[in-house]
Image (cartoon, helix red, strand yellow):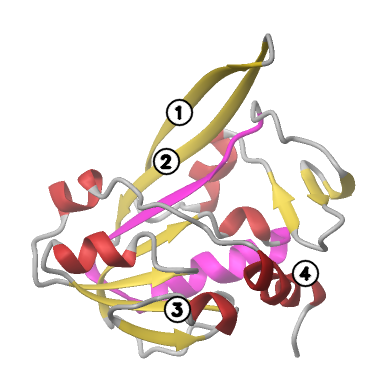
Amino acid sequence: MEVSHLKAWKKEYSSVTWRGPYDIGPIRAAVPPGALVLDVGCGSGKIMAPLLRAGYNVVGMDVAREGLLMVREGERIEGDARHLPFKDSSFDAVVCYDVLQHLLEAERQMAVAEIKRVLAPGGRVFVEVFGREDMRYGGTAVEPHTFRRESGIIYHYFSEAELLELLEGLEPRVESRLTRRVFRGEEHVRHRLFAAGKRQK
């Protein structure tokens, strides 16, 4: 059954172009070229493209077909992070950027359990989410630190401790990244948390 806040992404990708790409330095430092990588919530391919150019075999999966249609390279699969359509221990690495923050608490737990399931023993995981100091924090509250925007999309803002707990069992290391910009005389803060982990053998 399709959930309304996930369905909202179909409309979002119909009207917004997400541009990138992301920095893949941390991935390249931990995962050898040629590895099979799953990009959960690949969207328009901002992570897929540089990974493919760096010599990785990448499968991109997203809940919104509209986003997948923007991906120009690599294998694309329409799917749900809560129920990954892959066999156990299928991937050498899993990338999950800007996805978990758009799920409710129970869904976040489901998604991480699925990531653990499809990750091969010794495989690496890379996660990026919004932090609580982000200037966009707020909206119509639906759960603690979780808000629904007018678009219908869910936004959750993590603490470092919460992200560590969610990724328990993956030996995660979390880095807080704050970006400050001045716009029209006012300071605006973007806050992201980056986590890298590894499935135990």
Front-most of 181 and 132? 181
**Identity of the residue furthest to the top in this view:** 185
Q: Does the stretch in magenta take in 47?
A: no
Image quarter in which the N terminus is found: bottom right
* Distance of label 3 from label 1 (alpha carbons): 26 Å
Q: Secondary structure at mark 4?
A: helix
Q: Position of residue 17 (x, y in %)?
A: 55, 61
Q: Position of residue 14 (x, y in %)?
A: 66, 73
Query: Crowdedness of circle 2 by 10 Å Cα count: few (<14), some, many (20+)?
Result: many
Magenta part of the chain:
104-132
Of callouts 1 and 2, which one flags the residue occurring earlier in the amino acid sequence? Answer: 1
Residue 56 image-quadrant placement: bottom left
Front-most of 40 and 20? 20
Residue at 23% x, 45% y is 26
Residue 124 image-quadrant placement: bottom left
Q: Marks 2 and 1: in contact by CB < 8 Å?
A: yes
Query: Seen in the image, is 113 located left or right of residue 143?
Result: left
* Distance of label 4 from label 2 (alpha carbons): 24 Å
Looking at the rendered structure, the kind of residue marked 2 is Phe
* Distance of label 3 from label 2 (alpha carbons): 20 Å
Q: Secondary structure at mark 3?
A: strand
Q: Marks 1 and 4: in contact by CB < 8 Å?
A: no
Q: Secondary structure at mark 2?
A: strand
Q: Secondary structure at mark 1?
A: strand
Looking at the rendered structure, the kind of residue marked 3 is Met
Name the residue beneath numbered marker 2: 194
Name the residue beneath numbered marker 1: 177
Query: Seen in the image, is 131 located left or right of residue 199?
Result: right
The disc label shown at residue 5, or none? 4
Q: Position of residue 8 (x, y in %)?
A: 75, 71
Query: Mark 4, mark 2: which one is toward the viewer?
Result: 4
